[in-house]
């Protein structure tokens, strides 16, 4: 896989830490917020599933993707006036190396908080030993050739949970995954193909068809499954009934309608007011839930997300 050299530089400027030239680590806002508030503030994954925000390692084994979603935080080639002559060949690191180096990078990043009086010492020590891997930062992780081995390597290094987030365009890889994650996320960012093409701008011809093949695979997973709907005003917050039909067929354990956040690349492509408010997410989530027989079982105002399920409450994983 070849990418413009400038793209890698842009990632670095945005605070991504590279392992080799394809994998990246970047602590999310909530990790530091949790440490600086002595655990008062945390991400929705802590509220819904018991994942401690200060022990989460957010990474991706590749910065490349099959889509160019308008709302994505990722630097995309079309965002930049790039000197196309300077190209770099991406070299994928092996899973073991990625896990070990991700932990080291996370420690380096957090070491700046040592001595900060707002941070609880015990919590910081725990943060140095992450127990949750979110393979979801940027890029499509199933493009990485050893994704099953990567999940397995995280578990063998003591991680209690591993979440894998995919855009669903690589069903052939998911159908052969040797090790399941603790929870599998598939993004569904449109209720139909026309909106999918407009919002996700797939680089492959049959992205929508592949996404549906992935959704058909959800029944074959024994871990909890999630359909993530990233909502953008004026683009994909419509046709709730169509979303519901897709959900009814795939029967995920959860559906997470969530506001697209105006961060990173989003800000270059879309006006800030395209980011829906929490109440708007909740109303739209309720519409979807009503159509497909799911219920709102939890919510997080700060993350602008609601959790839909047929379960009474979410399964705590930690
Ligand atoms: S699928 Fe994910 S990483 Fe790829 S462009 Fe869309 S939001 Fe970004």
Image (cartoon, grey):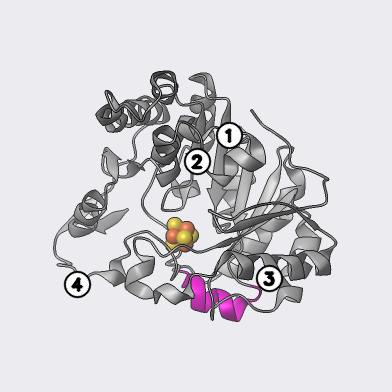
User: In front of the other: label 4 or label 3?
Assistant: 3
Structural distance between the alpha carbons of marks 2 and 3: 26 Å
**Labelled disc at residue 51:** 1
Would you say the residues marked 1 and 2 are in contact, meaning their CB atoms lie under 8 Å apart?
no
Instruction: Tell me: 286 left or right of 56.
Output: right
The numbered mark, 2 or 3, whose residue comes first in the sequence reads 2
The region drawn magenta spans: 191-202
From the Cβ of disc 3, is ligand 1 less than 8 Å away? Answer: no
Q: Nearer the viewer, residue 67 or 316?
A: 316
Q: Which mark is residue 81?
A: 4
Q: How many marks?
A: 4
Q: Which residue is more in the foreground, 44 or 77?
A: 44
Instruction: Residue 66: tell me if it is visible.
Output: no
Q: Sort mark 2 into few (<14), some (14-19) or many (20+) by Cα contacts within 10 Å.
A: some
Q: Are marks 4 and 3 in contact (CB under 8 Å)?
A: no
Q: Which residue is mark 3?
A: 284
Q: What is the secondary structure assignment of the residue under circle 4? A: loop
Disc on the earlier residue, 4 or 3: 4
Label 3 close to label 1 by CB (< 8 Å): no
First reached walking from the N terminus: tag 4 or tag 2: 2
Which residue shows up at 21% across the image and 52% down it? 13
* Lateral position of residue 212 relative to residue 79, left or right: right
- Please name which of the two marks, 4 or 1, marks the residue nearer to the observer: 1
Indicate the position of residue 24 as horizontal and vertical percent values. 34, 42
User: CA separation, marks 1 and 2?
Assistant: 13 Å
- CA gap between label 4 and label 3 equals 37 Å
């Amino acid at each position: 896989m070849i990418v413009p050299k400038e793209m890698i530089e842009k990632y670095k400027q945005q605070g991504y830490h590279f392992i080799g030239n394809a994998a990246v680590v970047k602590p999310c806002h909530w990790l530091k917020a949790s440490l600086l508030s002595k655990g008062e503030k945390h991400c929705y994954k802590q509220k819904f599933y018991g994942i401690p925000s200060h022990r989460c390692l957010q990474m991706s084994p590749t910065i490349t993707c099959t889509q160019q979603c308008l709302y994505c935080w990722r630097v995309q080639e079309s965002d930049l006036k790039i000197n196309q002559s300077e190209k770099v060949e991406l070299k994928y690191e092996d899973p073991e190396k990625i896990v070990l180096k991700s932990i080291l990078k996370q420690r380096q990043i957090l070491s700046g908080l040592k001595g900060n009086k707002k941070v609880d010492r015990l919590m910081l020590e725990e943060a140095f030993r992450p127990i949750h891997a979110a393979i979801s930062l940027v890029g499509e992780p199933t493009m990485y050739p050893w994704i099953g081995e990567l999940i397995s390597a995280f578990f063998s290094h003591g991680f209690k949970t591993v979440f894998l987030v995919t855009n669903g365009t690589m069903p052939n890889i998911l159908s052969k995954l040797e090790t399941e994650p603790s929870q599998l996320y598939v993004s569904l960012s449109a209720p139909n193909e026309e909106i999918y093409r407009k919002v996700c701008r797939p680089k492959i011809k049959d992205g929508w068809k592949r996404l549906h093949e992935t959704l058909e695979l959800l029944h074959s997973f024994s871990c909890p499954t999630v359909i993530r709907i990233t909502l953008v005003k004026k683009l994909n917050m419509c046709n709730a009934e169509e979303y519901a039909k897709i959900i009814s067929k795939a029967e995920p354990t959860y559906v997470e309608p969530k506001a697209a956040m105006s961060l990173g690349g989003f800000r270059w492509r879309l006006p800030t007011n395209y980011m829906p408010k929490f109440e708007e997410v909740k109303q739209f989530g309720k519409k979807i839930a009503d159509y497909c027989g799911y219920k709102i079982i939890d919510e997080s105002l700060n993350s602008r997300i609601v959790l839909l399920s047929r379960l009474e409450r979410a399964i705590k994983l930690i």
